[in-house]
Amino acid sequence: MGSKTIDAFDEYAENYDKRLDSPEGKTLNLKCLLVCYNEKRRHLVRYLIMGLPERLKTLWEKAKSYLEVADIAFIVLRIVVLAGGCAWLVFSDIPKDTIGYLIGLFIYFAAGSAIIFLSLFRFPKKEKIIYAFSLFFDLFFVTALVNMTGGFVSPFSNGFYLMTALYSFYYGTATGIFVAGLSIMLFLIGGNFDFARLLHWTDFFIRAAFMFLIAAPLGMLSERLKKKDDKLEIINKDLQESLSALKDLQGRVVQAEKLSAIGRLTADVAHEIRNPLTSIGGFARRLNKKLAELTKEKEYTELIISEVDRLEKILKDVLAFSRDVRSNLESRDINETVKESLRIFTDIFNEQAIKVEENLDTSMPSGLIDKDQLKQAITNLISNAVDAMPKGGALKLDTFMEEMYSVNFIVVEISDTGVGIPKDKLDMIFEPFFTTKEIGRGTGLGLSLCKKIIDEHHGLIKMESELGRGTSVKLFFPYQCEEESAKIKCWEFHKCRVEKAEGAAEFRCAAYPHYGRICWAVAGTFCGKRVSGAIAQKLGDCRKCEFYQRVVVRKDL
């Protein structure tokens, strides 16, 4: 039964191939292909029609951000001209030998206008090129229309005036005069130079003069309006920048107030805890001396002493953070402070197999620093780097000069190859009591204290980190050379009286008395803390300050 079925199938297949090779089979195959083609075409047309509204909406949204009121008016004017022309063709008494040419001319205008509209929507950024094309397109249309409807006496000759006015207003005086001259030449061509019968030469020159009289004033008016628009854009841009600067200043004020409130609270709490904690630690140490070795009681007292020591260290950090830091700034070699800080960790580096690389710029000038405070800040940063590399790694310390905000800074950079910090936590890294370490490993005050010390030095602290690759911290200390220090200071320029004792106490301007030539970076817009300069507080943006403009921009002071 199975072999018969196979033989029957082979016979059917052979007969089918023969039918396909026959003329009837080829015709049938061609019909099938045509049916498939038509079906695919219907699907394609349906897809295009269904997706057309969405694509047009997308193009409109894209073009809307670039198209101006003048562009919309330009489109509307073309629609009005086309509608008016169609009405004129319907209701006017036009000779039969001319009507066909005029209908063809308005079809040409409609097709060209459609191309211009689509080009504006598709390529809104290239509107200048599109309008240049439309200029010659429109001039040809008006010339042909004038030629077909009476030449010099054609009512459509006013179209040249309209063209001159439109393009003078859009492009300005020079282009307007060019369009006026070109319109006069085309007017001559459209009128077939028929001065003898249709127009006296004096009337022609009057019309030509009016074209130039339209082009020049409209072009100048357009240029004035464009200048005012440019000024408004600049003012709006400055306003946006000022608002951003004010928001930034507000954020700094809020941060400063928050830190002040946290400092007062933590100081009160720390003092309340410290007294009983000292008593507990003292009694535990006395008791520990009297207990026998290898007993549970001895083990318990040692655990109490260990925890008391840990709490006392935390309280020490809290009190250090809550105190109002007062720096005693002196001109010192920052490289020496960096080396002293490194020596503290020599044994830890060897224990944890941490390789240390020093790249200290020996040609770097001395900076105004409080040695003890800077040492504390660098020690905290190195300690964090060591904690981030429990299985070893590389620690790199660099010192160098860097220019930022038109100010020279002495920079101390500390980089490690540790675990890194997630990007979403970098914004919070200088917040008090925020830490990425395990519970019990840190208080979250180390970096906050560093920030406070750098602020007191009128500098900046910046951190970059990548998870799994390490962290880099830069400390920026402003530097003003002796040559600059001998020039006029900001308080002398503005006469804000900050150099007086009562003025200094009232304003606490960070620029006084060491940074009178770089005030914008230590007491103004570009400082990393609350703005303390009186003029900077008033203006909101140091770039608007006349002193800044003369020192940084014009460099004539």
Image (cartoon, rainbow, N blue to C red):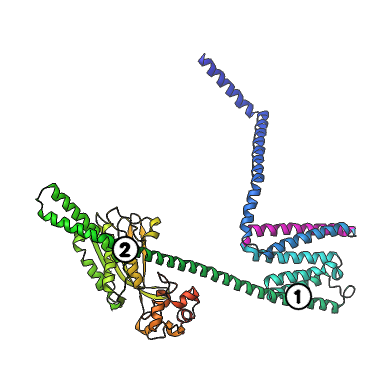
Q: Is residue 427 visible?
A: yes
Q: Position of residue 413 (x, y in %)?
A: 32, 67
Sequence-wise, which precedes: disc 2 or disc 1? 1
Tell whether 335 sits left or right of 187.
left
Residue 490 found in image quarter: bottom left
Instruction: Say whether residue 120 is magenta.
Output: yes
Who's the residue at 70% across and 71% down the image?
169
Q: Please tell me how crowded label 2 is: few (under 14), some (14-19), or many (20+) other residues with Cα within 10 Å.
A: few
Q: Nearer the viewer, residue 224 or 480?
A: 480
Looking at the picture, which amino acid does disc 2 mark? Answer: Asp
Q: Position of residue 466 (x, y in %)?
A: 36, 57
Looking at the picture, which amino acid does disc 1 mark? Answer: Ile
Instruction: Say whether residue 187 is magenta.
Output: no
For disc 1, the marked residue is 214
Q: Which mark is residue 268?
A: 2
Q: Position of residue 451 (x, y in %)?
A: 34, 66
The CA span between labels 2 and 1 is 81 Å
Residue 467 found in image quarter: bottom left
**Rendered position, 10 above or below 253:** above
Q: Nearer the viewer, residue 112 or 56?
A: 56
Magenta residues, start to end: 96-124
**Comparing labels 2 and 1, the label whose residue is closer to the camera:** 2
Q: Which secondary structure is most common in the magenta stretch?
A: helix
Tell whether 24 sits left or right of 240.
right
Q: Nearer the viewer, residue 517 or 454?
A: 454
Quarter of the image with the C terminus in it: bottom left
